[in-house]
Amino acid sequence: MTERNDTNGLKHSADEVRLEELREAIDDTDRVILGALSRRQSLSEEIGPVKRRLNLAPHQPERQQEMLDGLAVQAPLYGLAPDYVRQIFGVIHDHSVELQRNPGDE
């Protein structure tokens, strides 16, 4: 088994080192996802006033279904299960609708 010493002189196996590398990559990816969610939230906040001026309801079920269907079709292209993507984006969409209903509550 390959071992490495850390800055404190402790030995770590190659698997332990790899685990830490993978966790760091996941943390980096999570920060990218947070940035994307923040951008999406900002766009949703901008949409709210536009919908109000157009006399459109914050929740538009047809648009939600269209969005979720489109993402579910794309999911396998990214190695993701369609139901997983529907669930995640359903939560994201629900949050967007709530922001549009109650601007400034965040």
Image (cartoon, rainbow, N blue to C red):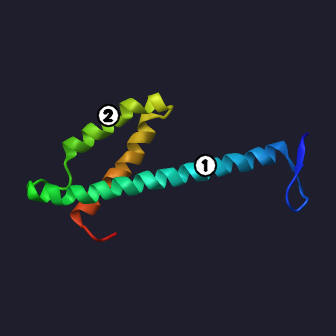
- Asked if one can make out residue 95 in the rendered structure from this viewpoint, the answer is no
Compare marks 1 and 2 and give the one earlier in the sequence.
1
Residues under numbered marks 1 and 2 in contact, where contact means CB atoms less than 8 Å apart: no
Going by the numbered disc 1, the residue's amino acid type is: Ile
Q: Residues within 10 Å of mark 1 (few under 14, many from 20)?
A: few
User: Which residue was labeled with disc 2?
Assistant: 70
Residue at the farthest bottom position:
105
Give, as a three-letter code, the residue at label 2. Answer: Gly
Estimate the x, y position of residue 99 in percent, counting from the top left. Answer: 28, 62
Give percent across and percent down for residue 37. 41, 54
Quadrant of the image for the C terminus?
A: bottom left
Answer with left or right where residue 36 lies relative to residue 50: right
69 left or right, relative to 61: right
Kindly report which numbered mark, 1 or 2, lies closer to the viewer in this rendering: 1
Total numbered labels: 2
Left or right: residue 94 compared with residue 24 = left
Circle 1 residue: 26
On the image, the x and y values in percent for residue 78 come to 48, 32
Residue at horizontal 36%, vertical 36%?
71
Figure quadrant of the N terminus: top right
